[in-house]
Image (spheres, rainbow, N blue to C red):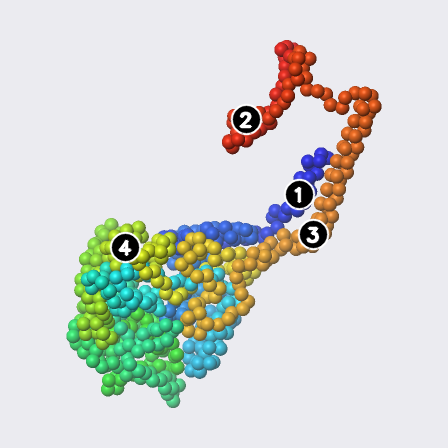
Amino acid sequence: MSLTRLVLFAAAAWADDSGQCNTVELDFVVLEGEASHRAIEDDIRAALLEVGVTARARFLEKEEFNAAMVSGDYDLVFSETWGAPYDPHSYVASWTTPDEAHYSVLETHEPPLDPTTFASWVANVSSEVDPVERQETWTEILSAIHAAVLHLPLWGKRIPSVVGRRLEGYVSGPQQFDYPIASIRVAEGIKNVTIAPGAQTGLFQSVGRLDPHSYRPNEFFSNNWIYEGLVKYGPSGNIEASLATAWTTDIRDDGGETFRFTLREGVAFHDGSAFNCTAVELNFDHVFASPLRGPDWHGWYGLPGSLADWYCDGNDFVLETTEPYYPLLQELTYIRPMRILSPAAFVHGIYTSPETHNSCPASWGNVTGDDGSELTCVGTTAPLGTGPFRFVSRTVDDDDDDDVVLDREVVFASNPEYWGGEPDIEFVRVLYFETHAEVKEALLSGELDAVIGAGVLEPSDIQDLQYSEDFDVLHSEPTQNTVIIMNIDDIDIRKVVVHAVNKGPIIERELGGIEQPVSQLFPESAPYCDVDLVPKFDYDLEKALLLNCPDSQTTKKKNTKSKTATVYGILFAAAAVLAVVLVVAVCYMVRKERAGEPLFMPLTNPLIEDEVQLAPVKDPEAKDVGSTNSVEIEIFDGRDVNK
């Protein structure tokens, strides 16, 4: 065996053998067009590959993506918690309905995380009247979810805002699409403000119907400027007064709960009509009509199913539930479907029947409830609320090719009669832009005063603008967490995924460092979620390898001594061979010396008088300037070398 081969063999003895990881292949479903998810999916797949897990990305359009989530046709899929004010109760309650992505995950679990037991658990905590007991139960629920490793938590979503410095006083709202621009003061220039807002579509497209009793294509932010509820969601989940100034709760003898709201006086709708209890009752009559309480309509959250009755008692509005339901106040803060619309916007005013002319969109048609009751949806006539801004106009661009309505410009005016004080802004113009680059250009040129919301500017642009003297760059507290749902039966593989992904560097590199890595399902600011969940399932490559590549770890530890002995043996053999070579060389030199022969032959040619001295010769092909390569020179005696 040659010396070179011995050395190479010694080095190879330290290398890990291939094929020591378990073979795992995962189906990674990604929504086509979701920029932040597209940016990091390859980073996640690369991290998993390091521990022997092959995640194959499957990019799907919205309809196919939703179908895959509902059917459970995925192993990994990006998702988000619903955020404030829906977390945690509305979000986890949705897991037990078959049309939600988590349902297929729970189906493979034993109690208490199977769909039936889990639904009962969430229902019980929702009816708990003792706040201390409620917190303890939520801690148990969150701990069980955490211990089962159902998710890879990634980052807490912070809502960015870039505001020109002629505007002052803007503070981010506690909800994802809550843009409280009424707090803005105009420090210089005209009192008209132009905004590019973040929308459900990312870049703004349309404000939709602008009715408060339905869903898409209505936008949260615009409805939130126009309409108000009885209460509103404040920082850290605090419930604050809005159209109701105070409220009380009592447990009735029949086991139900009564909520009594004292309504704010002196409030007017945008059409000038008075806000009163009759208007509130009319809105509840339409939104919570029996046929609309099913899960396909408004029954996706707990409030509709918990209501037993509602009525006016003087200027107090009274709600009665079938049993205690602590999230009721929190759910009354939702931007949809229960904000108060002026009676003037119902098709027959205050006398509009919820059965024959319901305020639900006309496109819903005739609706039949589970109890057989029926109603007809006819929609509303105008966007009239009590909020700080009134709708003025819109410039619509109908795209006949894909049947999409684009609002090129929507104008709102401040409400001079607003009970909270007239905003300093006089007019708000919301503009449509086709690309992120167009938004940035408009912002830098002065066409835009502010960009508020996620998905409007690229993360790198927001990062660059932080150093501008012309803008203030603000970020909200995390409103919701981005996670990967894992529909994987083997908990060890779920742990491998969690431990293999180093989130911090990925977020910094791909998302501009705007978002913050998280290790739990919900933001700590969500009610009942500020708990310490253990064990910590964070990045730990050694644990990931130990779980999925046990041979590479245990073999290395168990066989360290034998490997070391083998290598030392090989190196000893190599040294022995080298020693033999040296001994032979020395003997050869001694023999030559005794015979009177020179040890080294001079480099001469008998046909050339002078010796030729070999020296390093500059290689004309050398790439590094000044480098020299040794070049062999052969001296010929002029005879034909081929003879």
Q: Does 413 appear above or below 643? A: below
Disc with the residue nearer the chain's start (1 vs 2): 1
* Mark 2 neighbour class, 10 Å CA radius: few under 14, some 14 to 19, many 20 or more: few
Disc with the residue nearer the chain's start (4 vs 2): 4
* Mark 1 neighbour class, 10 Å CA radius: few under 14, some 14 to 19, many 20 or more: few
Quickly name the residue at label 2. 619
Disc with the residue nearer the chain's start (4 vs 1): 1
Q: Is residue 34 visible?
A: no
Point out the frontmost of discs 1 and 2. 2
| Label pair 3/2, CB-CB below 8 angstroms | no
Q: Which mark is residue 560?
A: 3
Q: Position of residue 154 (x, y in %)?
A: 46, 60
What residue occupies the far front of the structure in this picture?
A: 610
Quickly name the residue at label 1. 11
Kindly identify the residue that appears in the image at 22 percent across and 68 percent down.
424
Left or right of 21 in this view: 529: left
Callout 2 amino acid: Asp
Disc with the residue nearer the chain's start (3 vs 1): 1
Q: CA distance from mark 3 to mark 2?
A: 47 Å
Secondary element under disc 1, as helix, strand or loop, is: helix
